[in-house]
Amino acid sequence: QVQLVESGGGLVQAGGSLRLSCAASGRILRSNGMGWYRQAPGQQRALVARIDRLGSNNYADSVKDRFTISRDNAKNTVYLQMNSLKPEDTGVYYCNLVIYGTPNYEYWGQGTQVTVSS
């Protein structure tokens, strides 16, 4: 069974920084992608950033140049460095793992709250 454990959320003032971490454990095949999604109040969960094992990544337009996603393959851990935070970055951040295959298998963390005050 695969588990994702997130940490690093909290309350920060606008302009501040936070770093989220997500450690995956269990049977994780090498072909996988990890990422972060955000769900703001009253909105659907949406992609923030994703990264594959080779480091290829993509970001939501709203966070480009402010957020950086990275991963440590040896530890099956993904990080999200969030700088210059804005109130609109507030939401629950969920870690996501997709193990590619036929079919793909997808897993979610429990979510960590990020609140940015103005």
Image: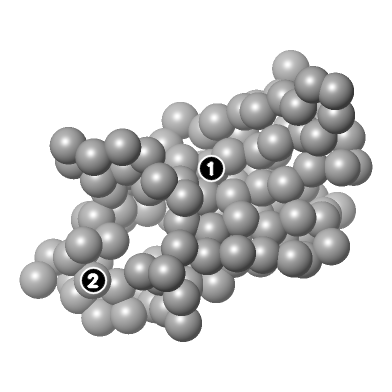
Determine whether the residue tagged by mark 1 lies in a helix, strand or loop.
strand
Check the image and report above or below for 83 versus 97.
below
Q: Residue at x 23, y 40 (%)?
A: 43
What is the quadrant of residue 23 in the picture?
A: top right
Identified by mark 2, the residue type is: Lys
Indicate the position of residue 90 as horizontal and vertical percent values.
24, 55
Residue count near mark 2 (Cα–Cα under 10 Å), binned few <14, some 14–19, many ≥20: many
Indicate the position of residue 81 as horizontal and vertical percent values.
50, 69
Identified by mark 1, the residue type is: Cys
Which quarter of the figure is the C terminus placed in?
Answer: bottom left
Q: CA distance from mark 1 to mark 2?
A: 20 Å
Query: Is residue 103 found left or right of 106 in the rendered image?
Result: right
What is the quadrant of residue 29 in the picture?
A: top right
* Picture disc at residue 87: none
Check the image and report above or below for 24 versus 3.
below
* Picture disc at residue 86: 2
One can see residue 90 in this view = yes
Farthest top residue? 1
Q: Residue at x 52, y 65 (%)?
A: 59
Indicate the position of residue 52 as horizontal and vertical percent values.
75, 55
Q: Are marks 1 and 2 in contact (CB under 8 Å)?
A: no
Per the image, the residue denoted by label 1 is: 95
